[in-house]
Image (cartoon, helix red, strand yellow):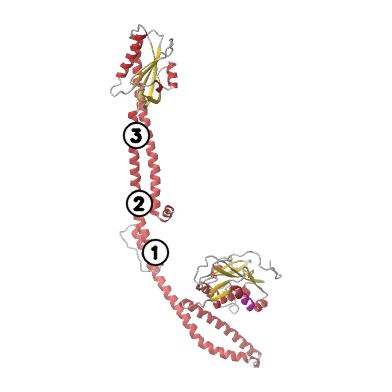
Amino acid sequence: MPAASLWRRSIQARVVITTIAISTLVIGGVGWLMLQGVADGMVEARRTVALSEARAGFSAAQQTLDVSAVSDASSETDVLRTLVTDLASRSGSPPSYQVLLEGPLDPTGDGDPAVVSSSGIASQSIPDDLASTVAEGEGIAYTFSTMQLGDTGEESSAILVGDVLRMPDGTQTYALYYAFPMADQERTLALVRNSLLYAGLALIVLSSGVAWLVTRQVVTPVRLARRIAERLADGRLEERMVVRGEDDIARLSVSFNRMAESLQRQIRQLEELSRLQHRFVSDVSHELRTPIATVRMAADLLYDNRDHFDPSSQRSAELLQAELDRFESLLSDLLEISRFDAGAARLDLEAVDLVELAERVCVQYGPLAERHGVRLRVVDHDGPAVVEADVRRIERIVRNLVANAIHYSGSEWVEIVVAHGTTSAAIAVRDYGVGLEPGQSQLVFNRFWRADPARERSRGGTGLGLAIALEDAVLHGGWLQAWGEPGLGAQFRLTLPKQAGEDPQRSPLPLVPDSGHAYDRTGGVR
């Protein structure tokens, strides 16, 4: 997803997004607390004023009733209506409260209780719990509810305060309610809420902009350093950062440039040394071919006539022949390495069956394996495994791996395993001998590397065989990999694409083999 990719790849995006998230949480929390504080303060102020005004109104209403003269029921109704009108007129304009009177609370007649209200306030606006509390006559009671106007049906939040009024003769009691609308407080609270919302959004945008600007000042030099580092990695060693100012970024640029200059100097020195080394190896290898050919002719002559020599001279001729063979092998390997270093190695491609190749190598090295007490077998998983490759180079790789397994593994069994898949084929040489120490699976392909430095040079090879094998595998676009554990043996796996130039994608053989043998020790297939 683009958002996830942006989060992973951009420090600036992560800082800005994190700043927005944290700012939103902090500003939202602070705004909510402020809004709650303002609302509680306004409600408490309105409640205090409402109770004060209602208490004064109840006292004035009771005094008015006490001095009024009521002769009959009609005059009582007129007195109550006049009382409600008088109380409502004291609320000012626009009225700060509404008045409602209900009763009598204990009617003796059959008619419904009288309801007298100002501005058409409906009796349904009085909650039952407030009405019950007031009817008990225990004093002033209040609650927060909604006020419903009888004419329009409009509802508004209000503080309802109630108390009882008693007629002078004490026979009748009425419930008097004051309704203090809170529309002004609601409008004020809405204004405060909107102001906090807009201010919070502005602060979030402002903090995000500040975070973007600050991180840009830091990230821009880092991005420039990344681009220059990529150019250095591509071989453009002259690239440098521009130094501006004297701050930490400037000092970082200076240090980066010094590092780049040091790397450039050392890389050029290494390139020059490598070039001289390759030139030296190539020149020496070629120059030695002529004198070696002359020495070879003389050594062959002595070797062919060794039967006419005394035992000491005969042994010397045999040793000279063996050492010349080793020297020519080393010289041949050095020439091959020099061709790889010079980029002059080329492939002679043809269709190669790896199964047939493995069987041919097995036949060639059969006598050598018998002399070392090694059982050599070919394990064919999927039938013919045909690849487009240079048969000479591939056979050289397999011969080198098989010879190493016979000579140095100390294993009674050496297996050549062949398999193929959709896009690749693989051939692996598996032994069950001494194995490899941790870390040696990479070192074995280094030039002149030996697992046992104390091993006699006369017994070991040139130390270039696996290095040449690796170069041959890479030249084919394949892989040559090694696995081994002490006491469990080792496996070298060559993976090749079926078509030259294609990506082999994956190997049909695992690099870490199964613990069991493909063949049991009696030669039978498991």
Query: Is the residue marked by circle 3 packed among few (<14), some (14-19), or many (20+) residues within 10 Å?
Result: some
* Sequence order check, earlier mark of 2 and 1: 2
Q: Nearer the viewer, residue 259 or 199?
A: 199
510 vs 246, nearest the viewer: 510
Q: Is residue 475 left or right of residue 261?
A: right
- On the question of residue 367 being in view, the answer is yes
Within 10 Å of disc 1 (Cα), the crowding (few <14, some 14-19, many 20+) is some
Mark 3 or mark 1: which comes first in sequence? 3
Residue at the disc numbered 2: 212
Q: Which residue is mark 3?
A: 190
Which residue: 35% across, 29% down? 42
Label 3 – label 1 distance at C-alpha:
56 Å
Could you tell me the amino acid type at mark 1?
A: Ala
Q: Quadrant of the C terminus?
A: bottom right
- Give the alpha-carbon distance from disc 2 to disc 1, as whole Å: 24 Å
Q: Which residues are magenta?
A: 358-365
The residue carrying mark 1 is 229
Q: CA distance from mark 2 to mark 3?
A: 33 Å
